[in-house]
Amino acid sequence: MDTAHFTWGRNSVNVVLGSAETRFLAPVVVGESLLATATVTRVEGKKHYVEVDVLRSEIVEAGESAREQHGGGASEPARVFQGTFVCFVPAKHVLAARGTR
């Protein structure tokens, strides 16, 4: 996941990660295609809650038979990662007060 970029965070200059609760649910191998989705589920002022799911994309595309082959159940067929991120979006960059930005 080190090469994945979540567009929302990358395109918002003033995002600071406050906390992350993550679960690695299944192993993946080098070269395997993954599909990551991030959804802002709640906003409380400057605090944004983001839910992230990562699925094996070939299972997502293949449908139910591939899910059964990989041992997935009906509720979470191909999920390999799940996380909740709390992000803060201040009006100015956090280093702006120091005159570095």
Image: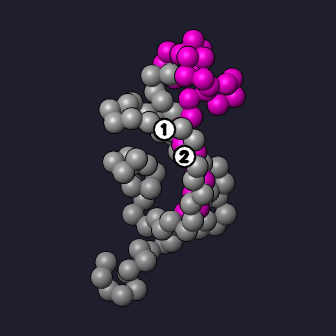
**Three-letter code for the amino acid on which mark 1 is drawn:** Pro
- List x then y, in percent, for residue 19: 57, 65
Q: Is residue 96 left or right of residue 24?
A: left
Q: Is residue 101 left or right of residue 94?
A: left
Instruction: Find the magenta span and give its range.
Output: 60-87
- List x then y, in percent, for residue 99: 32, 86
Q: Which residue is mark 1?
A: 27
* Picture quadrant of residue 100: bottom left
Q: Which residue is mark 2?
A: 24
In this view, the residue in front, 67 or 10, is 67
Question: In the image, what residue occupies the spot 54% across and 38% down?
Answer: 26
Question: In the image, what residue occupies the spot 58% across and 49% down?
Answer: 23
**Three-letter code for the amino acid on which mark 2 is drawn:** Phe
Q: Is residue 40 visible?
A: no
Height in image: 41 above or below 48?
A: above
Identify the residue at the far bottom of this view.
98
Q: Is residue 17 magenta?
A: no
In this view, the residue in front, 45 or 7, is 7
Height in image: 51 above or below 18?
A: above
Question: In the image, what residue occupies the spot 62% across and 25% down?
Answer: 72
Q: Is residue 67 magenta?
A: yes
